[in-house]
Amino acid sequence: LVLEEDDRYLLVHGRRRLAGLMDLAKEKAICAILNKDTPLAEILARLAAEYMLSGPMSPYNIAILLSLARRLNEKQRQALLNRVGINLRHHPATAFAAIADLSPEARLAVDNGSIAAATALSLFKLAPEARDLVCRIITALKLSRQSQRELLAATMELARRQHRDEPDIATEIWRYCRTCEGNPPQKSAALKRFLTEQLYPRSTTAREEFNTFVTGLKLPPNATLTPAPAFESDRLDLALTFENRNEFNQFWGKASAGPTRR
């Protein structure tokens, strides 16, 4: 279902079907062009009803409705927003507008939940040229919601600290991500380390000194010593791993006996 708008067609409904056709390398699709003589308020009311049949509306659904609702008068627009439960006091219209302007791949990721709703609604804080890149990083590494928030915050913070444009920062992060190896969780962990090193340059030197310190301790192979994130405190976490219960019992027997003199 498309609406003719200036010199283009705006896809109103059928994104998943269109994505399926694209996956099948189809170059054409049969579309129904909305009749401009049909009152837009009536079209949007029907569309909202279709969206809500499958549960809560996604941010992209709302973005499309708001884009089309600009043609309504204030009373009609408010009635539509009330009907679908949209409260612009919680999320500004600019947040939804940023979603509507994303690339088709990014919009699909928002629509299918690969990009969390909260993340999608925070994209408007980024420069427009950085949004699609950030979405590409999220989908490529399959970042968790927490990692998505951290990526957005780090991109904006690095731009502020280094006095650089956000698109440049996003490009640099994407370039690093393309060199990462391993499965998505491993790539996500590598990205987190990279962002930490960029945000806290001193931590790189501190980590080298810490590694030297740990080597000097000559810990057993099953012991791992981990510092606080970015060495922001003196806290150290010691983890001991055991192959089986018998190995643990042997260790615990010696440990509970107390220190011995040599």
Image (cartoon, grey):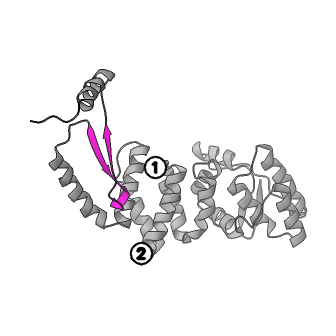
Residue nearer the viewer, 211 or 233: 233
Could you tell me residue 216's position as x and y percent? 15, 49
Give the answer, above or below, for where 16 lies relative to 88: above
6 shown above or below 258: below
Q: Is residue 237 magenta?
A: yes
Which region is colored magenta?
223-240
In the rendered view, would you say 26 is above or below 43?
above
- Which amino acid lies under the numbered mark 1 shown in the image of this protein? Leu
Q: Residue furthest top?
A: 246
Amino acid at circle 2: Arg
Name the one closer to the observer, 91 or 211: 211
- Which mark's residue is nearer the viewer, 1 or 2? 2
Residue 165 seen from this side: yes
Q: Secondary structure under badge 1? A: helix
Read off the residue under disc 2. Answer: 161
Q: Position of residue 70 (x, y in %)?
A: 79, 70
Above or below, comparing residue 28 to residue 35 in the picture: above
* Residue drawn at the location 22% of the way across and 36% of the way down: 221
- Categorize mark 1 by other alpha carbons within 10 Å: few (<14), some (14-19), many (20+): some
Q: Are marks 1 and 2 in contact (CB under 8 Å)?
A: no
Which of the marked residues, 1 or 2, is nearer the chain's N terminus?
1
Residue 141 numbered tag: 1
Decide which of 187, 70 is in the foreground and name it.
Answer: 187
* Residue shown at the point (71%, 61%) measured from the top left: 63
- Quick check: 139 left or right of 44? left
* SS state under label 2: helix
Return the x and y of residue 126 as percentages of the image width and height: 55, 69
* Residue 213, image x, y percentages: 19, 53
